[in-house]
Image: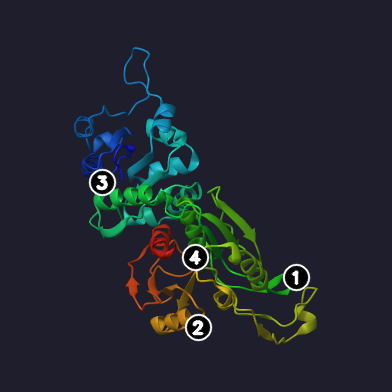
Amino acid sequence: MLKGKKIILGITGSIAAYKATYLICGLVKKGAEVQVVITPAGKEFITPVTLSALSSHPVISEFFSNRDGSWHSHVDLGLWADAMLIAPATAASIGKMANGIADNMLITTYLSCKAPVFVAPAMDLDMFAHPATQQNIDRLRGFGNHIIEPGEGELASHLVGKGRMEEPDRIIEILEEFFTGSQDLQNKKILITAGPTYEKIDPVRFIGNYSSGKMGFALAEECARRGAEVTLVTGPVSLTVTHPQIRRIQVESAEEMYKAAMAEYPQADAGILCAAVADYRPEQVCTEKIKREKTGEMQLRLIPNRDIAASLGAIKREDQLLVGFALETTDGLTNAASKLEKKNLDYIVLNSLQDLGAGFQVDTNRITIIDRKGEITAYPLKGKKEVAQDIIHKLVTLVS
């Protein structure tokens, strides 16, 4: 899986730099060729001599390491690699990557890299949680980088929280999963719904929900990465897609999403219904803005929207799959299992608003997958990209 792969390992100035030795050994043992690029601050935590001995390559740190006119080409490095892994990635380096501040060899190599980039943050919990850091990480995600979420535990400050770099063995597994699963959905067509729907009350007001669309977009990117042609039907969100094999259909209301899904599903091999579709809409929509001064108290009568999952389940062929989502607050397993059966789903992804870090407008999720055989698989809290990998791994085992 990693044999013959060329990996750039970027190391920044973190106490977690010592873990790079385990990463190099593990990657080399798997048959990968590793070229280390380290920042000047990184050399304060681990020596190039150690890294060079383990990787069997001279370590690159400066643009000009000799005074004879020779220099290191970040462009050539970016073209050479099959993947770039930055581990550990400090808040400072993440900020530079997110904003294109090319003031060292590692950042210029990153900006020149044509291969997939994996970033493993490592920092104190308050630095990781700071809005600036989170914004930079989200920006890197938006560029198509793969963020390897840090774990929780005791940090160098002796505080306990999230910010601990993921363990080397797991990072290597993630790289293996990326290269192994890159084409297991080739020639498959996947329909995915994502985001909220907005049900108009008048030209300026609507009924909606808190869905950000992040889970659905992560699923779309994961399917496309594995070779699928993806049709993404999405409600109003501010997210963008990066993979060229994702075709986006923008909708607003549940009725618009229903029509798009019903039109697209017959050509699909599988459908993944991740959108948070409004169950109800106003019976009447005012054509002009409702004025409080004129209207006073107002009653809003709601009528049911058409059930997208049930409608697709009714037309599903034997050669098609259908995956649903259940966001619950109580009796999660019971309600999800009932929905699975009633709507003719092949498996259902359950998450609960009772779980800290799961649900709307966060970058993490904790899910449980229930299939038609009654098998129940619970997963720990993970980043939504990693959750998408778990969900699609299940799909791959069922798709023909």
Which is more toward the observer, 321 or 177? 321
Judged left or right of residue 348, residue 22 is: left
Q: Can residue 121 be seen in this view?
A: no
At label 1, the amino acid type is Pro
Tell me the SS state at disc 1.
loop
Determine which residue is flagged by label 3. 16
Q: In this view, does 71 lie to the left or right of 31?
A: right
Q: Where is mark 2, residue-wise?
A: 342
Between the C-alphas of marks 2 and 3, the distance is 49 Å
What's the CA distance linking mark 1 and mark 2? 36 Å
Neighbor class of circle 4 (other Cα within 10 Å; few <14, some 14-19, many 20+) is few
Amino acid at pointer 3 = Ala
Residue of label 1: 203
The disc label shown at residue 359, or none:
none
Q: Where is residue 128 in the image (x, y as percent from the top left)?
A: 37, 54
Amino acid at dot 2: Lys
Question: Which quarter of the rendered picture does the N terminus lie within?
Answer: top left
Q: How crowded is mark 3: few (under 14 residues within 10 Å), some or many (20 or more)?
A: many
**Mark 1 in CB contact with mark 3 (< 8 angstroms):** no
User: Residue sitting at 65 percent across and 66 percent down?
Assistant: 263
**First-in-chain label (2 vs 4):** 2
Q: Is residue 272 above or below residue 238?
A: below
Badge 1: few (under 14), some or many (20 or more) residues near its Cα, within 10 Å? Answer: few
Q: In this view, does 127 lie above or below 332?
A: above
Q: Distance between the residues labelled 2 and 4?
A: 28 Å
Q: Where is residue 207 in the image (x, y as percent from the top left)?
A: 64, 75
Closer to the camera, 276 or 334? 334
Please, what is the three-letter code of the amino acid marked with disc 4? Gln
On screen, residue 395 versus residue 301, left or right, reads left
Q: Residue 361 carries which label?
A: 4
Q: Tell me how the rendering is colored.
A: rainbow
Rendered view: 371 above or below 15? below
